[in-house]
Amino acid sequence: MNPICVTCGMQYASPRADCPICEDERQYVPPSGQRWTDFATLRAEHEPLIKQEGEGITGIACTPKFGIGQRALFVETASGNFLWDLTAYLDDTIAEHITSRGGITGIAISHPHYYTTCVEWARAFDVPVYLHEGDREWIGRPDERIELWSGETKQVGDDLTLVNLGVHFTGGTVLHWSGGEDGRGALLSGDIVQVIPDRRFVAFMYSYPNLIPERPSVVRRAAEILAGYRFDAIYGAWWDAVVRQDGYDVVQRSAKRYLEFVS
């Protein structure tokens, strides 16, 4: 059995007493203690939730929510479909939906909190999972389909670029879709660039549940890197967490405000 942490959703290669992801200061072990489930039980206790989030972007998760509660994003592009971030839950309904739309060419994940059952997904669709090598120590279930990449960027499609910002985790990554939003561009950000209730801004944190701010030097570098990309929309990690317009300005304005407050 490959155990799955109930709190964060990480799947491990073999049974264990601890979850390194949850014991890290960016996450937490709940007061009730560490609990485990498995893939078969997860499928039996939940149902698929599939909902369009934007033009060419479909959200995929389960109900009731599991673990951290993020949803995956299925991105349909002219050069091939792609899956961004993951939810632990995967069943035949989700697989059939993706297959009916042309399948996927690969999967990429923003940071270790969403690595979850990536091996199950990779095997189901027979595609690689792109993870930044800066976070290799957090991989819970090694597999030959996991492809580590290095540096600041990796092209995973004609108009899809992984960009390592280093926010939240060393390998913290966003996906830039230059063809998204009718060519105005879209940034799929997970919670590396966090969409917040005030859609005029985004947030940058080292830990969200424990309220630890990100280091100013990391935020400054991230803003400088993203200055080289154009995007109108920002798709965050949660249902309906979307900045619909002026995304580029929102990021730059937010980084400037953040650095003013922490200076």
Image: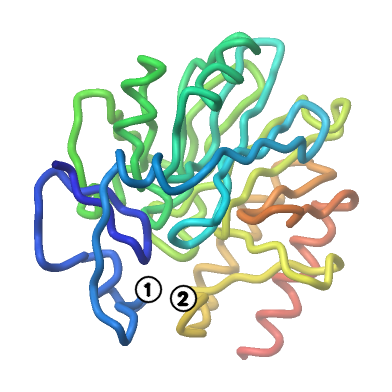
Q: Secondary structure under badge 1?
A: loop
Q: Which residue is mark 1?
A: 27
The quarter holding residue 125 reads top left
Q: Residue at x 70, y 70 (%)?
A: 255
Q: Earlier in the sequence, mark 1 or mark 2?
A: 1
- The percent position of residue 61, horizontal first and vertical second, equals 56, 43
Q: Which residue is mark 2?
A: 207
* Residue type, numbered disc 1: Gln
Q: Which mark is residue 238?
A: none
- The percent position of residue 62, horizontal first and vertical second, equals 55, 46
Select label 1 or label 2 by which is in front.
Answer: 1
Q: Secondary structure under badge 2?
A: strand
Q: Residue at x 34, y 80 (%)?
A: 30
Given contact means CB atoms under 8 Å apart, are the residues at marks 1 and 2 in contact? yes
The quarter holding residue 228 reads top right
Q: Is residue 199 above or below residue 224?
A: below
Name the residue nearer the viewer: 9 or 160. Answer: 9
Q: Is residue 262 above or below residue 242?
A: below
Residue 174 is left or right of residue 68, and the answer is right
* Residue type, numbered disc 2: Ser
Q: Residue at x 51, y 54 (%)?
A: 165
The quarter holding residue 67 reads bottom left
Name the residue nearer the viewer: 237 or 205. Answer: 237
